[in-house]
């Protein structure tokens, strides 16, 4: 039997405005609970919302970046439902006339590009935050209530968890490029809901759509999709079906668990918000926003390939993150070697970022420091292995590479007579390895080079050591 997985996503993105969506309260993460609140975001009687123009601008930015049609006439609606974190008993959102319609994002697969179509991007307000205590109590913090959001809704165009992951990464990268959100999932500024079901392509039987709510990491989203995919397929094999429901991902159990049955759109009793006038957006404002849009990831990738003579893969890695792309170009101000900088960032730097689970902007490594380090390597003052050790210390201390090299006496030995003396001593003490190499055991050469490097505390030029050893062995 053959099965096809169908995945659609709903992504909630907090906009990086200074104030909330409908009031002047600060839009900042954290702070003492219930201190960033006012009568408007608490929904107190008699309070009236005033729409945040910057939030509209940021939403239009996202719509343009994702190839959407911008509706010049739109409105705000009330989405009615009861939940403890929704203080008014309704959420101000958009129903039938979203700010942005259509659009798409292209992802790169092994067999080429795939277009993931968007249904809409609409603006709305965030809810409060619930905290469940060990005693079984639930506390509510309304600091987040009223924070401006855009909800990006895709068509069900993704067919594997991997496609969904690539989509989310491209979406987050673009949003950070256009500076409408910091997209920090750990702070809740980007959250993802998943709609997933499976079709038996031979019989046409399909499972009901399951919604998985509030995924706050890409890793968790992928695991949740993989789990649901297997669960749906197993139900089809057993001739059963899924309940149309909302589930959540349990990181401890590594499985999804039921939250509630899924509601229908009519259950929300959408109605026009009578406190907010219809929104009319001049074409001139849309054009102004479009003209001010910064360089997008795919444009930057093409420029990196052209300007720096990088491969498509290298340019793609370096431009996947706006901060990483900026770091690369800043480093080139201190050393004019596009390939050397690319290799080190994509190798040791990214490996370090992955190990420490941090972003480049959150480290003590600066473009100037990396440029200094690579200049030391390129000039032959230190070798690659020493460079890796220095890089590690720069990450930990933030010291200049030149200071570290001087303090630890790491300048590479380039005096051939000094190196030759060590090489001759190593060969005389390791005759068996010399014999092994002559008998075709190439690993013996690596051992001999290693012994010389050890004797010189890693400061000998390894290329020169390798050449000297081969020259002496060939003369034996």
Image (cartoon, rainbow, N blue to C red):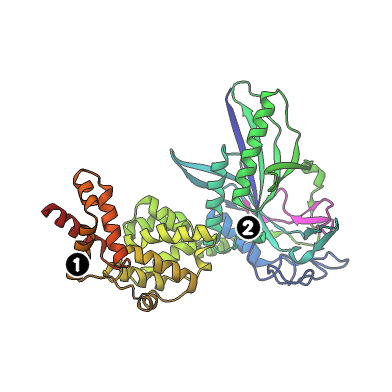
Q: Nearer the viewer, residue 443 or 391?
A: 443
Residue 209 versus residue 146 in the image, above or below:
above
Distance in Å between CA atoms under marks 1 and 2 = 57 Å
Per the rendering, the mark at residue 185 is 2
Instruction: Let me know if residue 337 appears in the view.
Output: no
Bounds of the magenta segment: 71-100
Q: Residue furthest top?
A: 203
Which residue is tagged 1?
A: 421
Q: Nearer the viewer, residue 449 or 164?
A: 449
Q: Residues within 10 Å of mark 2 (few under 14, many from 20)?
A: some
Q: Position of residue 160 (x, y in %)?
A: 56, 38
Q: 200 above or below 358?
A: above
Would you call the spot at circle 1 few (<14 residues within 10 Å), some (14-19), or many (20 or more)? few
Q: Is residue 230 magenta?
A: no
Image x and y of residue 311, in percent: 34, 52
User: What element does badge 2 sit on?
Assistant: helix
- Would you say 283 lies left or right of 73 here? left
Left or right placement of residue 459 versus residue 363 in this view: left
- Whichever of labels 1 and 2 marks the residue nearer the N terminus, that label is 2
């Amino acid at each position: 039997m053959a099965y096809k997985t169908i995945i659609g996503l709903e992504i909630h993105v907090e906009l990086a405005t200074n104030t909330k969506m409908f009031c002047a309260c600060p839009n900042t993460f954290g702070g003492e609970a219930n201190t960033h609140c006012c009568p408007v975001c608490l929904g107190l009687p008699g309070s009236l919302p005033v729409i945040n123009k910057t939030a509209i601008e940021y939403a239009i930015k996202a719509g343009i970046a994702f190839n959407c049609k911008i509706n010049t006439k739109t409105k705000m609606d009330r989405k009615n439902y009861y939940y403890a974190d929704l203080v008014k008993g309704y959420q101000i959102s958009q129903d039938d006339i979203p700010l942005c319609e259509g659009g798409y994002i292209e992802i790169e697969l092994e067999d080429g590009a795939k277009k993931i179509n968007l249904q809409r991007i609409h603006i709305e307000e965030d809810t409060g935050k619930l905290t469940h205590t060990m005693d079984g109590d639930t506390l509510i913090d309304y600091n987040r209530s009223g924070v401006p959001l855009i909800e990006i809704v895709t068509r069900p165009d993704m067919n594997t968890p991997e496609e969904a992951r690539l989509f989310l990464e491209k979406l987050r990268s673009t949003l950070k490029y256009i500076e409408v959100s910091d997209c920090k999932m750990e702070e809740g500024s980007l959250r993802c809901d998943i709609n997933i079901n499976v079709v038996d392509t031979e019989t046409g039987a399909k499972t009901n759509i399951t919604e998985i709510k509030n995924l706050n990491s890409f890793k968790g989203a992928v695991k949740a999709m993989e789990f649901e995919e297997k669960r749906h397929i197993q139900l089809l094999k057993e001739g059963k079906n899924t309940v149309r429901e909302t589930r959540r991902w349990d990181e401890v159990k590594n499985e999804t668990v039921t939250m509630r049955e899924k509601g229908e759109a009519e259950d929300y009793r959408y109605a026009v918000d009578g406190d907010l006038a219809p929104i009319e957006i001049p074409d001139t404002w849309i054009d102004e926003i479009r003209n001010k849009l910064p360089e997008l990831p795919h444009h930057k990738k093409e420029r990196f390939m052209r300007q720096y003579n990088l491969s498509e893969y290298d340019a793609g890695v370096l431009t996947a993150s706006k901060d990483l792309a900026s770091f690369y170009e800043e480093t080139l101000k201190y050393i004019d070697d596009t390939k050397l900088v690319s290799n080190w960032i994509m190798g040791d730097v990214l490996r370090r970022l992955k190990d420490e689970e941090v972003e480049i902007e959150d480290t003590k490594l600066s473009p100037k420091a990396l440029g200094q380090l690579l200049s030391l390597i390129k000039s032959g003052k230190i070798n690659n292995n020493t460079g890796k050790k220095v890089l590690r210390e720069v990450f930990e201390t933030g010291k200049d590479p030149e200071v570290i090299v001087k303090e630890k006496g790491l300048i590479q030995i380039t005096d051939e007579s000094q190196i030759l003396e060590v090489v001759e001593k190593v060969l005389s003490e390791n005759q068996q390895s010399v014999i092994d190499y002559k008998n075709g055991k190439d690993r013996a050469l690596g051992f001999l080079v290693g012994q010389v490097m050890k004797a010189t505390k890693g400061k000998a030029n390894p290329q020169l050591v390798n050449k000297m050893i081969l020259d002496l062995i060939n003369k034996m």
